[in-house]
Image: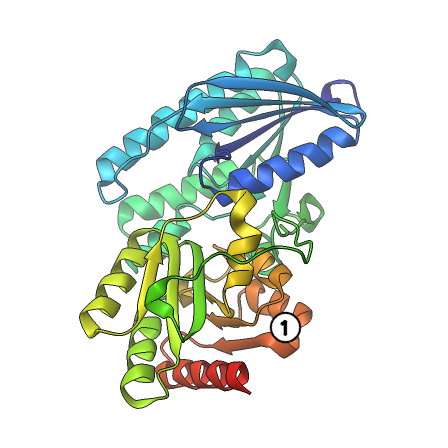
Amino acid sequence: MSAAHEILFYVVDWLPPDFGAVGQYGIVFAQELARDGRRVYLIGLTSQSRNSVLNEVGDGILEITRIPAVSYDKSRLIKRLVWTFRTNARLLWEVIRRPESRGADLLFTGAPPFFLYFAVLAKFIRRVRLIYRITDFYPEVVIADRGSRSPLLELLQRLTWFMRRHVDMFEVLGEDQRRILIEHGIASERIVLKRDRSPVVFSGHELPLRRPKELNGLTVLLYSGNYGVAHEVDTIVEGVIRHHQSGSGRIGVWLNATGRNADKVEAQLRLAGVPHARSTTVPLDQLPALLITADAHLITLRSAFSGIVLPSKVYACIASGRPIIYVGPKSSDLHLLCTEQVPNAYMQVGPGDVAGFVTALERLAKQKTS
């Protein structure tokens, strides 16, 4: 490894204590890279004031810089685009303004969206070596959400693949992502499989949190984390309602979640009068206690998002030792992970299969009482 490549700039979106799975994993991986003897500059966002912390980690050095940013209204497209452009420009400047960045490695992810364009600019300005850790595919996520391609999105997707071909190395989270890259002409030798893993460790001595009073006496199915556009809604809502109207009614849904679809699920369950609870996401250090509080975990994914999004919550859910119900397509690597690691505590239901989801809920309720 050259002296320049001993230096790595690692760019993410929100860093802890702010909520964001990419930032949580960024902390873990940055520490590992520094421990191997590299000097790592981890750069991300914070809702608080700017701060920078420098630590020796193993044989290397880790400097974490948090840049203040405000959240935005995701339902407002123009505001979202303006926020994305300004934020990416600030993150780029934080990299290229440092003399150490010349010839260094620049590792970035799919969050914030479209940082790829700014990373390619850094390649030409500072001659950095680009490592793209694909967390989400953009603009494919936008296309999947809309369900159609406009001429503008078609052009944007072509431009994005042109930019991707300037990347030196890809880190993929799963085999489904690898297939997408190879199908679009990315050489297999430029692709490395590097899965995420649980951002927290379970010691076995965690004390569970207090369960929501709304779910007293029920088997608790927990959805934790972001519940956004990539996640299935209708199958969940219809299945839970049917479970209470014509089934045993012994399952209660706990949404410890953020996101547009979390609001939608909560509103529809409230309207139907079925037991549920909603709470805000917990700090990372409380996540193990939260996950063991539940009787089982719910993970969802819309079919159109298979391969372009991988819900990162799966790793901590697996590590918690609780059963998992996954409502999503088998083509996602999420199904592969659960099948391999928790085959005896895992149920998969296809999106739209309401009857199948009701059956899974009844099986979970029966397992809990047996």
Tell me, yes or no, if residue 262 can be seen here.
yes
Q: Secondary structure at mark 1?
A: helix
Tell me, yes or no, if residue 312 can be seen here.
no
Q: Identify the residue at horizontal 22%, vertical 67% (top origin).
A: 270
Q: Is residue 315 above or below residue 235?
A: above
Q: Position of residue 35 (x, y in %)?
A: 77, 31
Q: Tell me the amino acid under the disc marked 1.
A: Thr
Q: Residues within 10 Å of mark 1 (few under 14, many from 20)?
A: some
- Can you say which quadrant of the picture contains the N terminus? top right
In the rendered image, which residue does mark 1 sit on? 339
- Can you say which quadrant of the picture contains the C terminus? bottom right
**What is the quadrant of residue 58 in the picture?**
top right
- In this rendering, position of residue 352 left or right of residue 125: left
Q: Position of residue 327 (x, y in %)?
A: 44, 71
Q: Position of residue 359 (x, y in %)?
A: 43, 86
- Furthest residue toward left: 271
Q: Identify the residue at horizontal 61%, vertical 55% (top origin).
A: 206
Render colour scheme: rainbow
Please tell me which residue lies in front, 43 or 129. Answer: 43
Q: Identify the residue at horizontal 33%, vertical 29% (top origin).
A: 70
- In this rendering, position of residue 117 left or right of residue 346: left
Q: Position of residue 80 (x, y in %)?
A: 29, 36
Please tell me which residue lies in front, 325 or 282. Answer: 282
Q: Is residue 204 above or below residue 285?
A: below
Q: Identify the residue at horizontal 24%, vertical 34% (top origin).
A: 79
**What is the quadrant of residue 67 in the picture?**
top left
